[in-house]
Image (cartoon, rainbow, N blue to C red):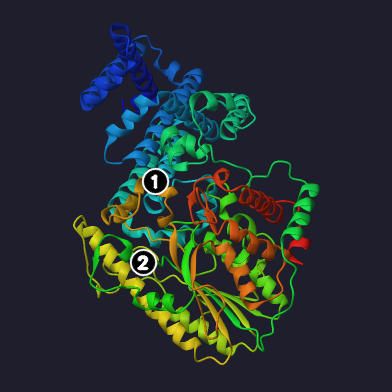
């Protein structure tokens, strides 16, 4: 009996589809409105599900009984046609369920009704998503050659993707992009950082369920697809699948144009209004950087010649007796939490704010939020922007890890500097162990090679240890040094145990939940530790004999709670227009030195890509053509990231077409040269970096 149930489970799915179809046809025939079918099913979800399942179950048993009576049961069960139809039915079922899973985990895990309402409003997009997932599931079934194992693998993969998208949306407030898959090799490093949000009981339940289903499959009759049928079908299925995944300029493109509304300029809306499946597929790109229209050697050469006309000729080299040390300190999640509409018993940035009054300071406009630290490093070290990358593009992994590229480090190497990058974690994350040497750093220092690795919290090396390592390197270097230091102490999560339960700052707010109160207090404690470390660094560089310049900034705002919960409860910013709100991307920026700086005291908001040319100007070093061009460009567009562009009057516009004509021209030339250097033929490299 058990084996017959397994063998004829496809008949249950068939009658399930048939019952739902007849239900819909009946409602539409009597009312003429298919929305009523959705409404009734949604209002009576439990009853509808039970009723449809019972009808399908009864019809399945009736079918099996008839086949037994007519002595056709074995013939049908072993039929190649039956197995192929079963594969089609299961693939369709997996497609529908998979698309629903993606929606539930993307829209609201706790309110199924919202996903049903979405399906009701965007039925065509749900069906297109289901078709694509069903197509992929059918391909997996053909590859494995057995219906149940192929279906199991497919639904497990769809579940993992839906869950990953869910967690990324929670912590980064952005969806999962196909380009994110390159970080799968770093799961061992990422999971400990989000372990507080992963339910152990749910994980155990999923693992046990997968094992139990696999054991059940081993002991069950198989629905195998004949190898000849597999050979005949696999190529057309692969062709159709490829066409729908890489749909641009294929026959499938017309279906996306008709049944979806792709919005690459706003990925939050793109994933919501099209559903996460179509949203994700719309971002599958074979190129990380979009090739500018008309890209050619002639056009790049013309741009370079135009740049030469725009920049001022360099007059003289630095007259300083000694080349100063240069230190970049990029501090993990360093931000001012007192900007929240909450009461703090103590200002965690007490020293930082004093130093920002003493030295040139302002705000850095980050290309990231809540994570993707390496993308901020990319801008600061290469002076290129994340603005031109396709969504999810990761320059460290996708580009810089593969070969050498010019950077601030390679520029300073030519001036006789010793260059070193340090990070108190292993070099696997973001492939830093490959990237730093490719950018010209003479030495890369990770946690296993560092002399100072003390922790002031349960998870990560303290900022104080990083400061000690920086000072030690400066004192030991017999040449002027450029040190790029990336801290990790303030990395999420922020559990109550992070500082052994100790908190010196209390936070109060009218709308603050106990959960967020605790998290913000722990975060503020970490910022206070960073603030103390920064003060120590400033004190110690004053004691050095060598002139030393430090550029200190926070890489991005922290992820406080799920789905911006901390910012919502803290009354901060316009969370509805999160991607267009400058305040969600501004972190403290400070230039401090043990010699007089000629910079303006108020730096305003600037992008990290300008740090290098600013330092070159400050020290009166001979700039490359590229740095000279950036110095001019900064006058027109001092800061920009996707959907946020600051013009020369400090006003925010949300697309480049709203900039002034000169600024638009600067941006076009800059984007052309970025593509040429990073992904193109490097026609202009020699002229730009000479």
- The residue at 37%/70% (across/down) is 459
What is the CA distance from the residue labelled 2 to the residue labelled 1? Answer: 21 Å
Q: Quadrant of residue 213?
A: top left
Q: Which residue is mark 1?
A: 577
Q: Quadrant of residue 598?
A: bottom right
Q: Quadrant of residue 22?
A: top left
Q: Which residue is mark 2?
A: 336
- The residue at 49%/60% (across/down) is 365
Q: Circle 1 — which element? A: helix
Looking at the picture, how far across and down is residue 551, in whole percent? 52, 74
- Of residue 305 and residue 569, the one placed in the foreground of this image is 305
Looking at the picture, how far across and down is residue 309, in whole percent? 76, 59
Which residue extends farthest front?
649
Judge left or right: residue 443 versus residue 575: right
Looking at the picture, how far across and down is residue 413, in whole percent? 69, 76
Quadrant of the snapshot with the C terminus: bottom right
């Amino acid at each position: 009996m058990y084996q017959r149930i397994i063998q004829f489970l496809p008949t249950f799915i068939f009658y399930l589809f048939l019952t739902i179809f007849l239900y819909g046809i009946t409602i539409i025939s009597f009312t003429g409105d298919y929305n009523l079918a959705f409404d009734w099913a949604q209002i009576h979800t439990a009853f509808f599900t039970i009723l449809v399942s019972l009808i399908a179950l009864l019809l399945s048993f009736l079918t099996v009984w008839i086949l037994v009576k007519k002595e056709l049961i074995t013939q049908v069960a072993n039929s190649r046609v039956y197995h192929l139809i079963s594969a089609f039915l299961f693939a369709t079922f997996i497609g529908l369920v998979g698309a629903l899973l993606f929606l539930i985990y993307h829209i609201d895990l706790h309110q199924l009704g919202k996903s049903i309402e979405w399906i009701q409003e965007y039925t065509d997009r749900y069906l297109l998503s289901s078709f694509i997932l069903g197509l992929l599931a059918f391909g997996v079934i053909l590859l494995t050659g057995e219906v149940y194992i192929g279906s199991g693998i497919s639904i497990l993969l769809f579940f993992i993707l839906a869950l990953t998208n869910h967690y990324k949306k929670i912590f980064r407030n952005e969806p999962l992009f196909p380009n994110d898959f390159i970080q799968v090799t770093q799961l061992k490093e990422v999971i400990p950082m989000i372990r507080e949000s992963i339910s152990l009981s749910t994980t155990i339940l999923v693992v046990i369920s997968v094992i139990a289903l696999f054991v059940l499959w081993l002991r069950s009759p198989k629905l195998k697809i004949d190898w000849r049928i597999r050979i005949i079908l696999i190529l057309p299925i692969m062709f159709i699948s490829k066409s729908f995944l890489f749909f641009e300029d294929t026959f499938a493109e017309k279906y996306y144009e008709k049944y979806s509304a792709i919005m690459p300029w706003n990925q939050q809306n793109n994933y919501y209004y099209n559903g996460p499946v179509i949203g994700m597929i719309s971002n599958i790109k074979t190129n990380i950087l979009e090739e500018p229209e008309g890209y050619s050697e002639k056009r790049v050469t013309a741009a370079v010649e135009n740049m030469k006309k725009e920049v001022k000729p360099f007059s003289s080299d630095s007259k300083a007796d000694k080349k100063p040390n240069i230190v970049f300190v990029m501090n993990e999640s360093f931000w001012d939490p007192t900007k929240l509409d909450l009461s703090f018993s103590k200002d965690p940035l007490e020293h930082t704010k004093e130093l920002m009054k003493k030295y040139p300071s302002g705000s850095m406009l980050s290309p990231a939020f809540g994570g993707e630290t390496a993308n901020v490093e990319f801008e600061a070290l290469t002076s290129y922007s994340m603005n031109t990358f396709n969504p999810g593009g990761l320059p460290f992994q996708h580009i810089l890890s593969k070969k050498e590229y010019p950077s601030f480090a390679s520029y300073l190497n030519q001036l006789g500097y010793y260059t070193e990058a340090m990070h108190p974690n292993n070099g696997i994350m973001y492939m830093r162990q490959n990237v730093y040497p490719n950018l010209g750093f003479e030495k890369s220092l990770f946690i296993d090679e560092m002399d100072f690795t003390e922790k002031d919290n349960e998870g990560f090396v303290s900022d104080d240890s990083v400061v000690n390592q920086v000072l030690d390197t400066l004192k030991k270097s017999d040449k002027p040094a450029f040190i790029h230091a990336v801290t990790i102490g303030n990395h999420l999560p922020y559990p109550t145990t992070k500082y052994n339960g100790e908190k010196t700052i209390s936070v109060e707010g009218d709308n603050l939940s106990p959960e967020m109160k605790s998290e913000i207090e722990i975060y503020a404690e970490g910022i206070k530790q960073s603030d103390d470390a920064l003060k120590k660094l400033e004190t110690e560089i004053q004691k050095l004999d060598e002139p030393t310049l430090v550029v200190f900034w926070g890489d991005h705002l922290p992820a406080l709670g799920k789905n911006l919960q901390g910012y919502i409860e803290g009354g901060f910013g316009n969370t509805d227009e999160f991607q267009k709100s400058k305040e969600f991307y501004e972190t403290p920026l400070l230039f401090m030195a043990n010699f007089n700086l000629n910079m303006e005291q108020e730096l305003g908001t600037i992008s990290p890509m300008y740090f290098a040319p600013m330092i070159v100007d400050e020290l009166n070093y001979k700039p490359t053509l590229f740095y000279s061009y950036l110095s001019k460009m900064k006058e027109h567009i001092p800061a920009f990231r996707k959907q946020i562009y600051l013009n020369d009057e400090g006003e925010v516009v949300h697309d480049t077409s709203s900039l002034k004509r000169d600024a638009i021209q600067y941006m076009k030339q800059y984007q052309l040269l970025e593509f040429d250097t990073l992904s193109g033929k490097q026609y202009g490299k020699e002229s730009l970096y000479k």
